[in-house]
Structure formats: C-alpha cells, structure tokens
Image: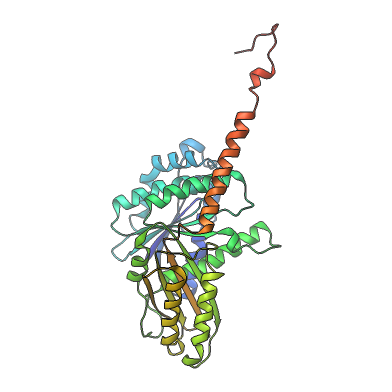
Amino acid sequence: MKTVLIGVGQAGGKLTQALLEFDKQMGFGAVLDAVGVNTAKADLQSLPYETVLIGQDRVNGHGVGGDNELGAEVMQADKTEVLSALEGSVTAKTESIFLVAGLGGGSGSGGTPVLAKELKRIYDIPVYVLGIVPGQNEGAMYQVNAGRSLKTIAREADAVLLVDNDAFRSSGESMSAGYEAINQAIAQRVGLLLASGEAVEGVGESVVDSSEIINTLRSGGIAALGYASAEASEVAEDNINAVMSTTRRAVLTGTSLQDASDADSALVVVAGKPDVIPRKGVERARRWVENETGSLEVRGGDFPLDSGRIAVLVLLAGVQRSDRVEAFMERARMAIEEAEAEAASREDPDDMWQNDDLDSLL
C-alpha cells in the first residue's frame, strides 16, 4: 500500500522515522514520503525528513506541556501550514495517509484528530491513524489524554490501528531503550503490512494487494495487528503446521493491542518464499481466524518475501469490544475522576489566609 506518513508529536515523529528506515532498508517502496509536525522545536531537529513547527505564536517552540486541548487549538490554527507541506507528497500514486502519534502527549493526542478531520475533507483516500496508547504505569495525565483523544480519533479517522506500549515493553529495559525497541517492533509489523502488494521478488499464488487492506479496515473503529514468525522448511507441505501455530501466536500473544481477538473483519497475510508457502496452511489459518474472531469477513493471501522464515500478519479491524480497550477507557475515566476529586479537595488559597484584621491584596 503506497502511503504518506505524518508524524505528529514527539512519539509520532520517532515512530515515523523508524517506519521510513525499515521501508528503505527492505526496499519495499511503500512509504512515498513523510512529514513531521510538532509544537516543540527540539523534537523536530533530529528528524531526517521534512518537518513543520506549529504554534510558534502560542508556545514559542517549547511544546504544549501535555495540554491536548492547547494542542488541538494550535493544530486548528496552523493546519494550513501542515497541508502546504503535504502538497508535493500526496500524489496520484498515494493510496492512503497514515497519521502516526502517541496518544498520551499533548501535541499528538490533541492535534491528530483535528488533522485527520481536515485531511478527510480534502483527500479522497483513506486517512488512518497509527496510535500509541500509554502503558498502565504511565501517569494519569497520559491516560486522560489518550482516552479523550482515542474517542475523538475513532470518529474522525477511517480507522485507528492501536499499539499498546505494554504489549511490547520488556522488563529491565531503560525507558529510552524500551521506546526504541518498541518503535523497531512496530516498524517491522506495520512496515510489512504496508508493503503487502508492493513489487517484491517472486510471485505468490494469491498475493495480497492494497485493496484488501483497505476493505478490511472499511468497518472503521479500532484495529490491531498481530505478528509472529518461525523457521521455514524447504518443502511447502512441511510448513502447514508452522503456518497454523504461527497464526495462533500472532493472534493470541502477538497483537499490538493485548487481548484483541473479537473483530468485525480480518486479513491474514503469510509471508515467505512463494514455493514454501502451503496453500492448505493459508486456508486453514484463515478458517481458524474466522472461528477465533467470530467474523465471517476474513481475507487471506501471500506476501512473497525472500526469507528463510514463515511470518504471519493478522490485521483485526473493528476490535473496540476487546477487553483491553474497555480496560484502557476505564483507566482513563478513573484518572479523570481522580483529577476532579483532587481539584475539588484543594483549599482555596484565599480561605487559608482569612483573618478579620487583614484584607486580601485583591
């Protein structure tokens, strides 16, 4: 799928860079161009692609400090600058636009819904969001921002492909090393999905193309992406069990959104050398995903790739009923209630200094 990436905010900018580098390294050519957008000048300086600094008259290049309402206001005011930067990027070859953002910060969670709405108004191609939701141990502000942003983005974008930090973080890693590893893992999975149907070596029996990704995501709402791989045999028939077990791992333990299994539609992509991908295994995997997700709309196909491994990607669309999403929204709701209770319990500074003999200064 030929796409243009827009990295919004610090996390979005870094993940966009990882996606660009993976696509270039693999030679897929799925990512046509990229633009980084932020309210913090320092976060844009290291990005090796075109960038747009917004909100200079409001925050002077210092960011919005996690205030996603301000992030939305700034994007609304400066959206013309972002659209101008995209003029040469979105061409007749472009099949989709992906907004990439961390949903816990201020610029990404606030600006992404505004930009998604504007892009859908202008372009007649799907506008998707690749959104990163904060882990359970991240602060209350991030939970509130992500909950509010996700609710809005799901309405404005054609679909939201969610990535849960907790699904990728390893114990014992430093925060910076953890985020870098998460970005690399996401870039590999999403990069392979975007490359489906692009010019690659070999010809598969039933190659997935861009239209199948678009049709799978047509139901809208929240989507998740599962991935797993295994060593491949040189004989196709010997890989039937490998395809089945890898598909199960991709859905049950390897999704970008934990515990996401029920889905309105799905796409199963089996990647590997064309002559070692078993047709019987692909069809069995597709039927298993139908049973596991409860969906009658499950597509499947090959992704010819010169590799000694069999890899399975499973795109699940319409997973907003998942336990993980419901738990995340509940965390956000509780964080809002706690913040409101804390604000209500604070004493008025003026009340603390009440004295019949003294008048307040103002």
Q: Is residue 309 visible?
A: no
- Residue 337 in percent (x, y) is at 57, 39
Q: Nearer the viewer, residue 109 or 320?
A: 320
Question: Relative to 264, is 344 above or below?
Answer: above
- Left or right of residue 168: residue 299: left
For the point 43% across and 64% down, the residue is: 263
Image quadrant assignment for residue 315: bottom left
For the point 46% across and 89% down, the residue is: 276
- Residue 129 in percent (x, y) is at 43, 56
Q: In the rendered image, which quarter contains the C terminus? A: top right
Q: Most extreme residue toward the top, as rendered?
A: 357
Q: Is residue 124 visible?
A: yes
Image quadrant assignment for residue 161: bottom left
For the point 38% across and 50% down, the residue is: 155
Q: Nearer the viewer, residue 358 or 329?
A: 329
- Residue 358 in percent (x, y) is at 69, 8
- Residue 300 in percent (x, y) is at 39, 76
Question: Relative to 121, is 290 above or below?
Answer: below
- Left or right of residue 286: residue 46: right
- Coloured how? rainbow
Q: In the rendered image, which quarter contains the N terminus? A: bottom left
Question: Relative to 85, is 337 above or below?
Answer: above
Q: How many marks?
A: 0
